[in-house]
Amino acid sequence: MRDKTQTNSAAPGDRLILAGAIVFFVGAVATLVTVAPLLLGTRPFPAYMFGLSMLMGVGFLVAGAGVLRSAAAGRRQARGTAR
C-alpha cells in the first residue's frame, strides 16, 4: 500500500526540471543523429538544424525555471522556519 503523506513531497520545480531535461535530451539526440552524416560529408547542412538547437535551448530554459522555482521554495521554507 502506498504512503499518501509522501505524494506531494517533491520540490515545486522538480517536474519542470524533469520536463526540461527530457526536452533537452531529445533535442541533443536529434542533433547528434543529424550531425553525424554531416561530419561524414554524406549530406549537406539541413535547414532544420536551427530548430533542433532551439529545442535544446527551450529544454535548458524550462529546466532552469524549475531550478529557480525549487530555490525560491527552499528560501520561502527557510524563511518560514527561521521565525
Image: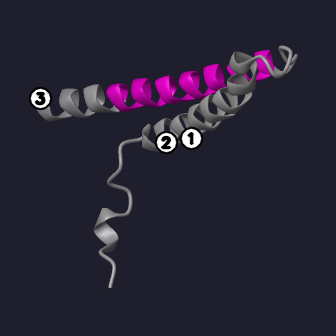
How far is mark 2 from mark 3, CA to CA?
30 Å
Task: Name the foreground residue: 37 vs 22.
Answer: 37
Q: Are dots 1 and 3 in contact, CB under 8 Å?
A: no
User: In the depicted view, which residue is nearer to us: 1 or 34?
Assistant: 34
Give the residue at mark 3: 82
In the picture, the quarter occupied by the C terminus is: top left
Residue at 49% of width from left, 44% of height from top?
15
**Mark 2 is on which residue type?**
Leu
Which x, y percent locates residue 54?
71, 19
Question: Is residue 83 visible from the viewing direction of this image?
Answer: no
Q: Mark 2 falls on what kind of element?
A: helix
Q: Circle 1 sits on which residue?
A: 22
Q: Which numbered disc, 1 or 2, marks the residue closer to the eye?
A: 1
Which of labels 1 and 3 is toward the front?
Answer: 1
The percent coordinates of residue 58 (x first, y second) are 64, 24
- Front-lying residue, 64 or 9: 64
Q: Amino acid at mark 1?
A: Ile
Q: Is 68 inside the magenta-drawn segment?
A: yes
Q: Residue at x 42, y 42 (%)?
A: 14
Number of disc labels: 3
Q: Earlier in the sequence, mark 2 or mark 3?
A: 2
Magenta-colored span:
49-72
Residue drawn at the location 29% of the way across and 29% of the way down: 76
